[in-house]
């Protein structure tokens, strides 16, 4: 069996003699898709000086582009305040932003459900509460909504 047949399967066009051409990108995609994922744990825990240096580098980069850091209240609504600041030039609309993101989550549950480690309805109810931290799913929903 050829390598391609191993990755694409016996019934694929690669092993059936079809003259369709496959690029190196197609082959690489097959390798990535069929490579078993092995989770890794990052054993490096940065100390406060590493965090300070990272923050300083971030500020320098922002300055390079004429941007600045905006502090938002750390009350559990920070992701929604930050999004509100970018969308409406004010963090004051964080409740509206949260409401719209939760609506996006509910209206398109098939897009997000597989990324939520709990019952989806329970997750949406939790995310609707003020003070609940946003996560990668709410950030993706916000991106999709905009």
Image (cartoon, helix red, strand yellow):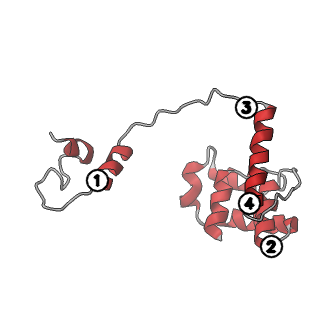
Residue at numbered disc 2: 88
Residue at numbered disc 3: 46
Label 1, label 2: how many angstroms apart (C-alpha)?
45 Å
Element type at marker 4? helix
Element type at marker 2? helix
Question: Which residue corresponds to the image point at 68% horizontal and 57% vertical from the top-left?
Answer: 138
Residue at numbered disc 1: 24
Label 2, label 3: how many angstroms apart (C-alpha)?
35 Å
Dot 1, how many residues are within 10 Å of its Cα: few (below 14), some (14-19), or many (20+)?
A: few
Question: Which residue corresponds to the image point at 58% horizontal and 60% vertical from the top-left?
Answer: 109
Label 4, label 3: how many angstroms apart (C-alpha)?
26 Å
Label 1, label 3: how many angstroms apart (C-alpha)?
39 Å
Q: Pick whichever of labels 1 and 2 is earlier in the sequence.
A: 1
Between residue 87 and residue 77, name the one nearer to us.
87
* Image quarter of the C terminus: bottom right
Residue 54 quadrant: top right
Residue 7 quadrant: top left
Between residue 122 and residue 80, name the one nearer to us.
80
Of circles 1 and 2, the one toward us is 1
Dot 4, how many residues are within 10 Å of its Cα: few (below 14), some (14-19), or many (20+)?
A: few
In the image, residue 92 lies at what x, y percent?
88, 67
Between residue 11 and residue 110, name the one nearer to us.
11
Label 4, label 2: how many angstroms apart (C-alpha)?
24 Å
Q: Pick whichever of labels 4 and 3 is earlier in the sequence.
A: 3
Residue at numbered disc 4: 64
Of circles 4 and 3, the one toward us is 4
* Image quarter of the N terminus: top left
Q: Pick whichever of labels 4 and 2 is earlier in the sequence.
A: 4
Circles 1 and 2, Cβ within 8 Å, touching? The answer is no
User: Does residue 125 appear left or right of residue 40 in this picture?
Assistant: right
Of circles 4 and 2, the one toward us is 4
């Amino acid at each position: 069996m050829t390598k391609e047949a191993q990755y694409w399967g016996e019934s694929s066009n690669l092993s059936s003699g079809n003259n369709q051409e496959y690029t190196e990108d197609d082959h690489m995609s097959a390798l990535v898709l069929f490579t078993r994922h092995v989770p890794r744990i990052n054993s490096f825990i940065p100390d406060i000086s590493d965090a300070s240096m990272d923050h300083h580098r971030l500020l320098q980069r922002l300055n390079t582009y004429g941007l600045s850091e905006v502090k938002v209240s750390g009350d559990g609504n920070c992701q929604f305040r930050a999004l509100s600041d970018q969308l409406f030039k004010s963090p004051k609309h964080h409740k509206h932003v949260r409401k719209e993101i939760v609506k996006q989550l509910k209206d398109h549950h098939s897009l997000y459900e597989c990324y939520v480690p709990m019952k989806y309805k329970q997750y949406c109810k939790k995310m609707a509460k003020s003070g609940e931290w946003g996560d990668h799913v709410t950030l993706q929903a916000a991106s999709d909504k905009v």
